[in-house]
Image (cartoon, grey):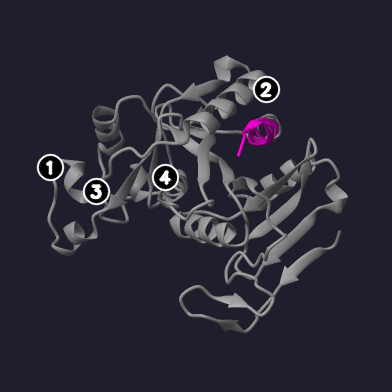
Amino acid sequence: MATKLVGKSSYGNANFPVDADGRTYHVATKVGECAQRIAVVGDPHRANVLKAMLDSPSEAIEVVSKRGFVTITQAYKGVPVSIVAIGMGAPMMDFFVRECRAVVDGPMAIIRFGSCGAIGSGQIGQIVVASEGSALLTRNVDFFLDNAHAESPSFAYNLSKVHPANPALSAHLVEALEAEVTPARVVKGVNVTADSFYSSQGRIDETFDDSNAGLVDYLRSNIENVQSLEMESFYLLHLARSCKAPGKSIAAAACAMVFADRRANSFIQPETIAEMEKLGGKAVLDALVAHQL
């Protein structure tokens, strides 16, 4: 089926813009183009890796929005699924969850399959499951406005409580990953979602005042079994639990391939990414179809 490239349209309703066809403003899908079970990724290339695993990839409905979202919908093992590439960061996850929820009837299950930095026991070549949930770490911008200098990173950064993943979907995810990549390559624990790749993940940049020396150690000291840092999973888990409309529940879970070992200061090689995307992608799809809505 041909890819639908959705361009500029006229929209009504400033509160929740949709066009005359019922397409949402950012993701640009309408009813019938998004399934109840979704694998959400950041990278469009990764979406195509998963697309190749569908029952009939050439028959997939594919929608590309002007905002950069790619939605691929078909079946996996006879069960309708969607694969959505969203890019990076909190706003993109927010657009995705709310707008896909708006065009899907009934309960949903969503698994994020992303990448992360390991700050616990994880290593490159492993996959971290946020089985115990995710916390949110944000830059305290007022600290920098006042030109203060914290003795502890807790002054320059705000850390939330841990918000849980859906236990049943997480269990399916762990089981599928362990079957596909072996238990030794699956790490379970708490994820931290940061609001940036650099300052809020403790990367040192001498060009900017980030006041983040010791930030990763602060996370290790304050969150039991913390394993990973990335930029999206918290918002998926939080929004899923915040969806309270009758009959529109969202079960959410998250996993991420370790691209950066922050302790060893090492980064993944392309051949390892290719292997992990295939193995991990299949496990994510298996977990989605195993989960009862």
Q: Which part of the image, by quadrant, shows the N terminus?
A: bottom right
Query: Where residue 288 sits in the image (x, y, percent)?
Result: 64, 36
SS state under label 1: loop
What amino acid does circle 4 point to? Phe
Residue 171 in sight here? yes
Classify 121 as above or below 37: above
Task: Give the labeled residue for mark 4.
Answer: 234
The residue that appears at 40% across and 51% down in the rendered structure is 242
What amino acid does circle 2 point to? Glu
Query: Does 114 appear in magenta?
Result: no
Residue 203 in sight here? no
Task: Give the labeled residue for mark 3.
Answer: 157
SS state under label 3: strand
Part of the protein shown in magenta: 280-293
Q: Residues within 10 Å of mark 1 (few under 14, many from 20)?
A: few
Mark 1–mark 4 CB contact (< 8 Å):
no
